[in-house]
Amino acid sequence: MEKKINSSRIWILFGLILAVGLIFGLVLIEIQIVHGQAYSELATKGTTRSQTIQAARGEITDRYGRPLVQNEVGYNITLDKAYLTRGKENEIILRLLGLLSAAGDEWIDKLPVTEAEPFAFRDGQEAEVAKLKDFLNVGSYTNVEDVMSWLVERYGLEGYTRTQQRQLAGIRYEMERQGFSISAPYTLAENVEVSTVIQIKERSYELSGVMVVESTVREYAAGDIAPHLVGQIGPIYAEEYAELKNQGYAMNDTIGKSGIEEAFESALRGENGKRTITLNSNGEVIDAAVTKSPVPGNSIMLTLDIDLQRVAQDTLAQEILWLQANGEEGEGREASSGAVVAIECKTGEILAMASYPTYNLATYNQDYNDLLANPDNPLFNRALQGTYAPGSIFKPLVGTAGLQEGLITPAYTYTCNHVYTFYEDYQPRCLGWHPNYTVMDALRVSCNIFFYDLGRRLGIDTLVDYARQFGLGEPTGIELPEALGHMSSPSYSEGIGETWNPGDVLQASIGQGKSLFTPLQLATYVSTLANGGVRMKTHLVKSIKSYNLDQTVEDVEPEVMVDMNLSDTTVSAVRDGMIRASGQNGYSGTSGAYFGNYAISVASKTGTPETTGFPNGTYICYAPADDPEIAVAVVIENGYHGYWGAAVAKAIFDEYFFGKTNDQIPTKTDTLLP
């Protein structure tokens, strides 16, 4: 009986095991055969990551559609973390650098440490050195060797030579600053040669994660033309990304860093596309697909004329270099730098704006360290950011105020006896003796005492008001950041802790004292003189176009900022005085050597403002005097004689009036890209 019971239990147990096995078998059949493909994908599928496809950036042209900045198809070398073998990053980068070096291609390296031993912090890069130390969380006193040691430890570079450590540190540091990740590949080299691309592809088996990316490369068709105005683009750094990500930027985007590239970033940038990468559970890429196509940005048409800009830049440089070689000691030989601005009077459009010394956008990355170390600071835009005492070019403003306020008439005369004796304790001098001079002749010979007396009678408040209306010490309207400068006044002196004395109005009346203005403001001022007291909004952008320039998105219309309502008598008298200063109509004037026999009437004024060092040279003019079209202002630092600037202005007038006939000026049809 007991054996029969045990036998039954065995059969029951056997049946249960068989049932369970059958169930498992059926489940396995369902998993492996019926739904095998789906479960296989689930087993291998891990996560997805998005990569940004950069939109083609809008281009930048001159007023006729001739390119200043355009896009060309080029090849960038990037590191893609999704494909880069973990733990082998340094070895792969070194192999890549060897290829690039042998081919003569540059790679991006912004580490502010010299590349050769003994290592040192780069000259002129104090701000970048401070960022590096802050990045490493070390003290400001930390020396370069300690910084290198921290970098070696951070990136595991102990087993490499000192040269290799420096190369790798420069790249790894930049990769980390730019937030290198699966979603943000790192661009190591831009616009490399096709032969280099071929070599990289042939050796792809040992360069995992190294990608050749065909992209639009910023091509500077005229890299040395207006670099301060065009500006640069650059990568987004980790410290910037926190704010920019809310504006739709990705870590591997580029962004305008200065100039028009920065000011019109929103118009130029376009709309990026997206690539989705699928990774398996081992982190290996199993799929990549474009899920959103990029949309190119709009292009910017500037008011500049490339030909006029070239002449302005070249002539300014030539004049300064000529002075260095031929000028008298203390009277121009020390000339070092300067700026020139030319404005279309009736519209306020900037036709040319140059700053010297300058640089070339096409070689900016290669020259970057040298540019920063240059004591003359070629990266500084003196036309927009430099501020200078105007000197005697301020006198037409004083003459305008005196005539308009009724203190003098064109027939009024004043005798200059070489010394101004109104104040007992302050008696400044003139360079000459000028008996019974009208305002026209006082402008012609630049008599200080005539304008001392007129300025004193007007009073500093009136002078400040006229300066404001002429745009001196005021925003001009330009789309780029500009220094504002300031006019001498009691409030300014009080603000810097100094006492304003009654005699200070005399120096303010001849453009001295504390008055400092930018070359752009000086050009706006003389353009307003040319317009009879109508100040136009000064601007650099003519229109915003579609990417291919075939449609207008926005036109920039001329805009009146101030109308001073000057009388015809006032305008005519000051204009006549400035024509006489040009040595025309039978008069001998301060720039008669340049414009005395010129084919077009020119109104001008020279200045030699004193500084703490050698005097600067300032110059303003416009032409034709009877129907003004173009106004020019020139500043030459340490140039001494204002009339040196007349040579620069004359070259600009030569190009503007005679350099090209109407059939030589390119039309939009001739120049716009297809």
Image (cartoon, rainbow, N blue to C red):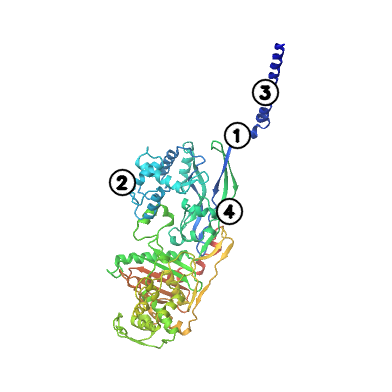
Mark 4–mark 3 distance (CA, rounded to whole Å): 59 Å
Looking at the rendered image, the disc whose residue lies closer to the viewer, 4 or 3, is 3
Name the N-terminal-most of marks 4 and 3: 3
Looking at the rendered image, the disc whose residue lies closer to the viewer, 2 or 3, is 3
Q: Name which residue lies at 41% across and 86% down.
A: 407
- Disc 4: which residue: 295
402, above or below 69, in the image: below
- Disc 1: which residue: 43
Q: Residues within 10 Å of mark 1 (few under 14, many from 20)?
A: few
Identified by mark 3, the residue type is: Gly
- Disc 2: which residue: 118
Name the N-terminal-most of marks 4 and 2: 2
Name the N-terminal-most of marks 4 and 1: 1
Identified by mark 1, the residue type is: Ala
Name the N-terminal-most of marks 2 and 1: 1
Q: Which mark is residue 21?
A: 3
Looking at the rendered image, the disc whose residue lies closer to the viewer, 1 or 3, is 3
Q: Nearer the viewer, residue 253 or 652?
A: 253
Identified by mark 2, the residue type is: Pro
Note whether residue 588 is visible: no
Name the N-terminal-most of marks 2 and 3: 3
Percent x, y of residue 467: 43, 76
